[in-house]
Image (tube, coloured by chain):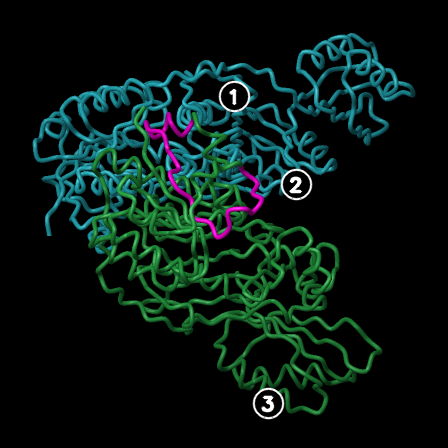
Chain colours: A green, B cyan
Amino acid sequence: MESIKIGILGMGNIGTGLYKILQINDEKIKNYANKKIEVKKVLVKNFEKQRDVDIPKELLTLDVDEIIYDPEIKIIVELIGGINPAYDYLKRSIESGKHVVTANKAVIATFGKELDDLAVKHGVQIKFEGSVGGGIPIINTLTESLSANEIEEIVGIINGTTNYILTQMSEFGMDFETALKEAQIKGFAEADPTSDLEGEDAVFKLAILSAVAFNKRVYPDEISREGIKKISQKDIKYASELGYKIKLLATAKKYGNNLELNVHPALIPNKHPLASVNNEFNALFIRGNAVGEVMLYGKGAGSMPTGSAVLGDVLSIIKAIETDGIKNSNNNITSKLVVNNIGQSKYYVRLEVVDEPGVLGKIAINFGKYGVSLESVVQRARGEKTVPLVFITHETDREKLDKALEEISSFSVVDKIASILKVEE
Amino acid sequence: MESIKIGILGMGNIGTGLYKILQINDEKIKNYANKKIEVKKVLVKNFEKQRDVDIPKELLTLDVDEIIYDPEIKIIVELIGGINPAYDYLKRSIESGKHVVTANKAVIATFGKELDDLAVKHGVQIKFEGSVGGGIPIINTLTESLSANEIEEIVGIINGTTNYILTQMSEFGMDFETALKEAQIKGFAEADPTSDLEGEDAVFKLAILSAVAFNKRVYPDEISREGIKKISQKDIKYASELGYKIKLLATAKKYGNNLELNVHPALIPNKHPLASVNNEFNALFIRGNAVGEVMLYGKGAGSMPTGSAVLGDVLSIIKAIETDGIKNSNNNITSKLVVNNIGQSKYYVRLEVVDEPGVLGKIAINFGKYGVSLESVVQRARGEKTVPLVFITHETDREKLDKALEEISSFSVVDKIASILKVEE
């Protein structure tokens, strides 16, 4: 059986998963691809590092050029992560005529268009299923299966770390710090969890989804984001009383020619399929104008699931090479969409107020004054100096809400505006 | 812009959806395919029939040969349904060099291999995403995204009619007949619902999944099936008390070289993602040896969702034609799998017994005698002549269970064995 040679850049978590899958599913892969996949070279930083897989020493190299300029290697898999030097390696790989597969969300979110154009120019493919949602086939679904649809909306839980933390807080009443420590012990949060907690990781993925689903390229910086650090046990409890879960959501919604993109913690009704996506699992809820609602669910990270996505891309390229069917993306159509947060939303607002008669009425009147109508109110705790007063509004502009809250915050009975969260329906 | 001509066989429910999507998403489709899709001919049975879409009269024909032998038509979409004459039309279309797309589960389940071989021989593609799960991208996910995986298990809710009925019975306490009428009124059940209720529809789909996921061709007749007619309000109530929902499941499980295929109503724990798949929605839960658990969820039927899947297939073929990359399936590898129901399972057993002391003990001892151990027992109703006695067993062979129940059914205090259902975990 003929073999096809690949090079792998980076042998960390995902690289190890990929290498393992190549070993355990050797027969399946040969049957599928009609070829044997041979790993010819692996770029590492350190020859001596102990790894979970047994890679022959002679495959390892410290010199990326040995891979990029090896004429026998047809496909290069980049699994280093981060922008530098991964972006440079990917560019040079494409320029040297290699097909490339990557799971690098930072590079694809930031330089996806440049790499795409370069790949078209050099007649090679670039694929990146593993960059969003780990093993969940979201990129393939959007670009292939749902190609007949105008995508209207994507709502996703696409960060496993924050979802694990919020699940622990919700199910076991843990506070944020304890849940974070738990996540770190279980390997669901990194030693420095900033990128996950502050929504940066989710923003990278949402930028990729925006390009793929809406043909609208958006730099990560342009996407508004809010992390989960401010979510308190109180908010989780009140949301639960009102029939909601709090999740870190990445949302993309089209209103006419406007595309609203957000990464934010939000309330989602218990009966919504995303509400029961717990712990390290990810899920993406998609609404297309033909297919209606579709949801994809699975492990959004991890060595084997992401390795599965990466190898799926490699196999797809091998099949295309075999049939001479290298498809070049030709998304040169300029999207008319303007990124704009104009959509209305319901909001959850928690105030801390002095516990005395008439406070609720005074605040409710003020919401009304600015055209914000209320769907529900919860006022439970009593007898403390300040007590939480929780509102869920009907659909409203954020601007109106902010004006109403500005005036409300000046009331002497209002201690503070403790949280404002969107409510997704 | 260049156009590609297609022919459509059948303008019923799905055909109408396809035609509508071609109209409303015209721009998206042109951008995606770099070509205009032109419907050149539509085979109908009746020129005068009132349709939901406005099709120019001159496109309609009563003569299939006008489509099959039109040299300008590159792709033929078969949406007639049923084996005859659809199978004949598909064969002749392929023989005349046309790529074909179909949503016909009966034909693909029964003659998928023959059509596949014929397509390879004639250098054309055959695609059938719409045949399972409506708009849910299950075929594409199994054949492309998860290609690096050995699939170990598929558990699916793939029949919307029965899921709608069971949901109504479970949520509103309806009896089977009332729920069926409700489903018929809402358009989720046909006038003759036999094929859905008795599991035949799900068996077709499971046969297709078996071929696609396990490379194992199984005739629909070879798959054991049980419909939902025997499910009573009592079973739903007891299952609920024990923390389960009853769903009609299609299951495919690999144990070594054995493949167990079943369509049957079964209990599934409330916390399982499939338990909250309600009404007309479908979902497929897949376990791959690399990706772990993945679930796909969406509308499993209907004009627009299925039209979306069909058009996705058409677009994929157009892209392949454009790049000369017609991929021919070459699944000539003989699967080693043997279809065999050898797996163990937990079982739910409802007996109707005389309400007197000692009955439970006597029956429990008898289960033990045959090596069937019990996980839980519910004995609620009192004071009637016979009362239900409900058991959930631990994992056991069906053979042992049947032997135990044979002896139990001979006890004078046992009126009847009212239900035996599998429990999926």
Q: Report which residue position mark 3 lands on.
A: A407
Is label 1 or label 2 in front?
1
Q: Report which residue position mark 1 lands on.
A: B261
Q: Position of residue B151 (x, y in %)?
A: 49, 30
Outermost residue toward the left in this view: B71
Disc 3 marks a residue whose amino acid type is: Glu
Which residue is drawn at the image coordinates 24% and 36% (left, top)? B11
Disc 1 marks a residue whose amino acid type is: Leu
Q: Position of residue B18 (x, y in %)?
A: 27, 42
Tag 1 and tag 3, C-beta contact below 8 Å = no
Q: Where, by quadrant of the figure, is residue A84 drawn?
A: bottom left
Q: Position of residue B404 (x, y in %)?
A: 75, 12
Tell which subunit mark 3 falls on. A
Which residue is drawn at the image coordinates 40% and 33% (left, top)? B132
Residue interval drawn in magenta? A28-53
Residue A31 magenta-highlighted: yes
Q: Position of residue A132 (x, y in %)?
A: 45, 53
Residue A343 magenta-highlighted: no
**Mark pair 1, 3: CA separation:** 64 Å
Would residue B163 appear left or right of B148 to someone viewing this image?
A: right
The answer to whether A399 is drawn above or below residue A82 in the figure is: below
